[in-house]
Image: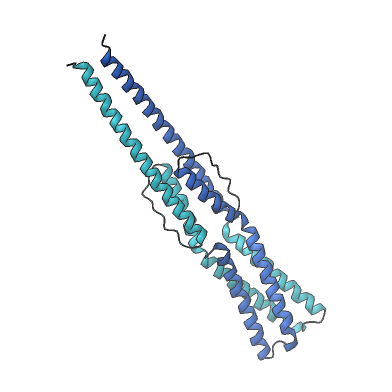
Chain colours: A blue, B cyan
Amino acid sequence: MKLKNYILVGYLVSTLLTILVVFWAVQRMLIEKSEVYFLVGITLIASFIGAAVSIFLLSPVFSSLKHLKKQAQDIASKDFSTEIETKGPLEFQELGQAFNDMSHNLQATFQSLDESEQEKRMMIAQLSHDIKTPI
Amino acid sequence: MKLKNYILVGYLVSTLLTILVVFWAVQRMLIEKSEVYFLVGITLIASFIGAAVSIFLLSPVFSSLKHLKKQAQDIASKDFSTEIETKGPLEFQELGQAFNDMSHNLQATFQSLDESEQEKRMMIAQLSHDIKTPI
């Protein structure tokens, strides 16, 4: 189930609950029968708008998730160029920061390994040369 | 702002909207004045329950976010032991999978670099020995 649907389920519960209570209240004569359509209408519209607001607010989350996945795949293939700018909820900003830090650390580690590899390769070439042409 | 508050804002909008419409309807005589408390009550309770359901459903998201952050920090310090089991929304499961794949790939890359480093070190030792004791 997608993240969006998790939010919609909450609104569905809230809407159904309100509608059920309205019908129960009509049966108990707490609400006039003629008002039912109006009340159900408000409930549906308000829930729809609430859900739309939530999903609109969460749109940076959806894009952050995509970017994080893309960055993980890039790092897996040793491409550290992707920098993430995570917008949206605090938790995502922190995760994005941890991700960028990880990327920088790994890049530095790989770089120093490459340098040490390069050094050793040169040493081997030098030593081989020394063996072939002794002083 | 935390993820939880993003969801609460949606419910706040939805609740305020319903309450405003109810008061407007009372002024327009569409709803009996005596019903206002009852309707506002339902709206508040239903929104509260809806928000609680959403946040309860999203609880795996909160823990996934924490785990992902922890794993990013572990990987940054070359600790590939943390395996993530992301529950919750599909997008998070995919992100967790991408993360685990990245961890495995990096571990393999580091291992092969270490082996090549080891090989070169042995070669250097061998060559140095050959120079000191020529045949």
Looking at the image, which residue is at 65% across and 80% down? Answer: A19
Observer-nearest residue: A13 or A107? A107
Left or right: where A104 falls relative to B18: left
Q: In the picture shown, does residue B86 fall above or below A77?
A: below
Q: Residue at x 23, y 17 (%)?
A: B131
Q: Position of residue A87 (x, y in %)?
A: 60, 50
For residue A49, what is the image quadrant?
bottom right
Outermost residue on the right side: it is B28
Residue B132, percent from left and from top = 21, 16
* Numbered-mark total: 0
Q: Is residue A98 visible?
A: no
On-image quarter of the C terminus of chain A: top left
Seen from this angle, which residue lies furthest front? A132
The reply to whether residue B44 is visible in this rendering is yes
Determine the image quadrant of residue B67.
bottom left
Residue drawn 59% across the image and 53% down it: A63
Give the x, y percent position of residue A20.
62, 83
- Near-viewer residue (A75 or A86): A75
Residue furthest to the left: B135
x, y (%) of residue B69? Answer: 47, 50
Q: At x 45% / y 47%, what residue is drawn?
A: B72
- Is B98 placed left or right of A131 in the picture? right
